[in-house]
Amino acid sequence: MPVISFASPKGGAGKTTAAILLASELARKGAGVTLIDCDPRQWCVKWAEGGKAPEALRVLAKVDEDKIIDVIEAEAAQSPFVIVDLEG
């Protein structure tokens, strides 16, 4: 299944906003989506905890560098879309 990563070395580039918009729109259209929040500030998690995430959207956090590939592969086997918001 597709894995889409949002990455930039610069903070404030809009990665989290773009990741949330894409993930939530796909989920609203009925697709299963896993959003992996790799930012230590966990903005995606905070957004989801605010009650705005569609039911078809699963948000994961606290995924460290050593496990990110394994987590992405495991989620890609279960979810039609995996979106990764990387720290920057």
Image: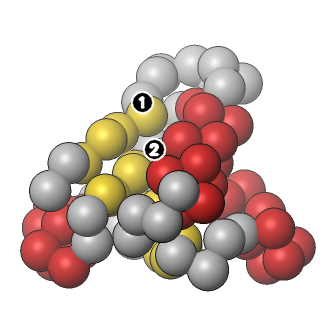
Say which residue appears at 72% left-offset and 56% top-offset: 43
Residue 23, given in percent of the width and then of the height, sits at 53, 52
Quadrant location of the N terminus in the rendered image: bottom left
Write down the residue under mark 2.
86
Identified by mark 2, the residue type is Leu
Identified by mark 1, the residue type is Ala
The answer to whether any part of residue 67 appears in the image is no
Residue 82: which quarter of the image? bottom left
The answer to whether any part of residue 1 appears in the image is yes
**Which mark, by number, is residue 42?**
none
Q: Please give left or right for residue 51 compared with residue 5 in the image.
A: right
- Say which of 37 and 17 sits in front: 17
Task: Give the residue furthest to the right.
Answer: 50
Is residue 23 positioned above or below 64 on the image? above
Residue 34, given in percent of the width and then of the height, sits at 41, 68
Within 10 angstroms of label 2, few (less than 14), some, or many (20 or more) residues?
A: some
Q: Are marks 2 and 1 in contact (CB under 8 Å)?
A: yes
Residue 35, given in percent of the width and then of the height, sits at 47, 62
CA gap between label 2 and label 1 equals 5 Å
Residue 62, given in percent of the width and then of the height, sits at 49, 74
Q: How is the image coloured?
A: secondary structure
Say which residue appears at 54% left-offset and 42% top-offset: 22
Write down the residue under mark 1.
7
